[in-house]
Image (cartoon, grey):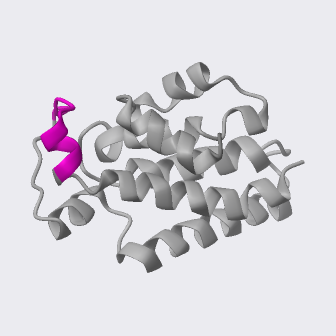
Amino acid sequence: MPNTELAAKLFTDGCNCAQAAAAAFAEDFGLSQNDVVRMTAGFGGGMGGQREQCGAVSAMVFMAGIAFGDYDPKDNAKKKELYDLVKKMTAEFREAYGTVNCRELLAKAAIFPKPDPSERTAEYYKARPCIRFVLQAAEIMKRNLLPLKK
């Protein structure tokens, strides 16, 4: 199943935005989906329901680190390459939606959620724009991470 389709499926199966976006690429980088779902659990809802950085954006940063973060911490050239990649991917997301902030993304759709997780119902999926953010993050990762994969 293509990464974007898998990301959408994971989201509609109950994963949060970060889990769905990141886990769709787990196997591409030698990780299990279950491990990535566990590792990214706290990023959903804009960092644990705080509505800060969008979880799908956090997933992009997480997967960039998985893909390209294996360097000596003193290697500033490699660190800069990773940081530049993160900046490029977040800029692509920001260009598409005007922000990377969960609260602002939801407000644009007239959604003002509580910090606690919402029950996943048909109404939830109908009202929430989050699947679009998950798909956008997956597309950005597909373009930026997979071609550079070691």
In-image side of 13 versus 22 (left or right): left
At horizontal 37% and vertical 73% (from top left) the residue drawn is 97
In-image side of 15 versus 119 (left or right): right
Q: What stretch is highlighted in magenta?
A: 116-126
Q: Which of 119 and 104 is in front in this view?
A: 119
> Can see residue 21?
no
In the displayed structure, 2 sits above or below 31; it is: below
At horizontal 76% and vertical 58% (from top left) the residue drawn is 79
> Can see residue 89?
yes
Q: Nearer the viewer, residue 128 or 115?
A: 128
Give the total number of marks visible in the rendering: 0
Q: In which quarter of the image is residue 122?
A: top left
Residue 91, percent across and down?
53, 74
Residue 85, percent across and down?
69, 65
In the displayed structure, 21 sits above or below 145; it is: above
Which quarter of the image is occupied by the N terminus? top right
At horizontal 81% and vertical 42% (from top left) the residue drawn is 70
Residue 125, percent across and down?
23, 44
At horizontal 67% and vertical 51% (from top left) the residue drawn is 64
43 inside magenta stretch:
no
In-image side of 44 versus 135 (left or right): left
Residue 86, percent across and down?
62, 62
119 inside magenta stretch:
yes
In the displayed structure, 127 sits above or below 144; it is: above
In-image side of 9 versus 147 (left or right): left
Q: Nearer the viewer, residue 50 or 137?
A: 137
